[in-house]
Amino acid sequence: MLTETGSGRTRLLVLVGPTAVGKTNLSLALAEEWNAEIISGDSMQVYRGMDIGTAKATPEERSRVPHHMIDIHDPEYPFSVAEFQERCTAHIEEIASRGKLPFIVGGTGLYVESVCYQFQFSENGSDEAFRAAQQQYADTQGAEALHARLREVDPESADRLHPNDVRRVIRALEIFHVTGERMSDQLKVQKKQTPYELCIVGLTMDRALLYKRIEERIDQMLEEGLVEEVERLLAAGCTRDMISMQGLGYKEIVDYLEGKYSLEEAVELLKKDTRHYAKRQLSWFRHMKDIEWIDVTELPNISTQLSEIRDIIARKLHLDR
């Protein structure tokens, strides 16, 4: 059976890398070659109506290869890493039961890693009054001031979380407040043992080229109607404090539409925020174990890179080429 090895463990293929590095095109080619079904490893692609800003695979691309974990929630839904892990694990087993290869593709490091190594998530207790106080502080003093509070007690989590991700910043503060432990320390003690026959391929490229591709992608998103997409979401009742609307490409355009920035200023901010996000993604992946890195700077040599990746997949998953 394709999906199980001699050990009886389910095979799992994973492709990670920073935004705009070229995961989508490569994932389609690999999925078609290895009889795989793709599971989106992106925390934002779960939301319906948020297509351009999240860079979802197009309907045409999804018609080539089955995709999962896309368009499963409305934008007002508070999606979490724990739910992602539960749903993704179920998809892996279901895909494998049909003799297909489960294939996670995405750039949300914690989400992907939580599935690969089955992190244990506990509620760690909660303090509603504390949460409300932190939210009020963010509302009155600004997200940057709240983020500074997190940096004082848990600098590693502060490096991982964007200041505008207020909900997760508050959660990290709450964990420290309730337990006296840093969220970053709790992540470090997770037992990173996988239940799968695991192959993780990571894509990287020259930083200057990656930044150029990020800027070109954002320009393309604007041409495809990113502003109009955000306008539709606001008209449908979405608000800036929703988790979905705090994603890259949405919060910056909301600021423009509300008159905080000109369009040019909002776009420049989006490009800067996305560059910083790519750096955080690479930093997260560099600390993950088991990743086989492929440098895709020389894009014209994609056939060479594909051959190299095929060799890695065949070796790690014990498959015949």
Image: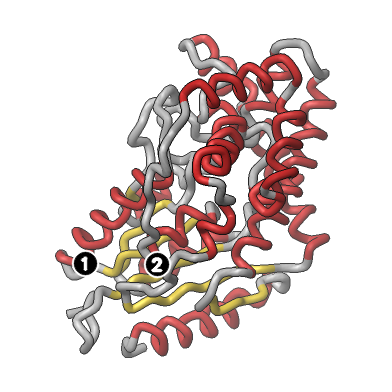
Height in image: 240 above or below 184?
above
Q: Residue at x 31, y 65 (%)?
A: 102
Residue 37 locus on image (x, y percent):
31, 60
Q: Name the one closer to the observer, 155 or 16.
A: 155
| Image quadrant assignment for residue 48 | top left
Q: Which residue is mark 2?
A: 117
Which amino acid does the dot numbered 2 rest on? Tyr
Hey, which quadrant is residue 253 in on the image? top right
Q: Is residue 246 visible?
A: yes
N-term mark: 1 or 2: 1
Local SS, label 1: helix
Q: How is the image coloured?
A: secondary structure
| Left or right: 165, with 56 as reference point | right
Is residue 24 visible in the rendered structure shown here? no
Residue at point 41%, 85% (across, down): 316
Which one is nearer the viewer's eye here, 190 or 262?
190
Q: Position of residue 294 (x, y in %)?
A: 61, 76
Q: CA distance from mark 1 to mark 2?
A: 18 Å
Residue 33's place in the image compared with 269, above or below, is: below
Q: Is residue 25 left or right of residue 156?
A: left
Quadrant in which the N terminus appears:
bottom left
How far from the left and from the top, in percent, is residue 277? 69, 48
- Amino acid on which the number 1 mark rests in the picture: Ala
Can you give x and y, in whole percent of width and height, for residue 109 in the image? 54, 57
Indicate which label's residue lies in the foreground, 1 or 2.
Answer: 2
Q: Is residue 120 left or right of residue 179?
A: left
Classify residue 25 as left or right of residue 154. Answer: left
Category of crowding for the residue at label 2, using alpha-carbon neighbours closer than 10 angstroms: few (below 14), some (14–19), many (at least 20):
some
Q: Which residue is mark 1?
A: 96
Q: How many marks?
A: 2
Which quadrant does the C terminus fall into?
bottom left
Query: Which residue is located at x 74 percent, y 58 percent?
Result: 210
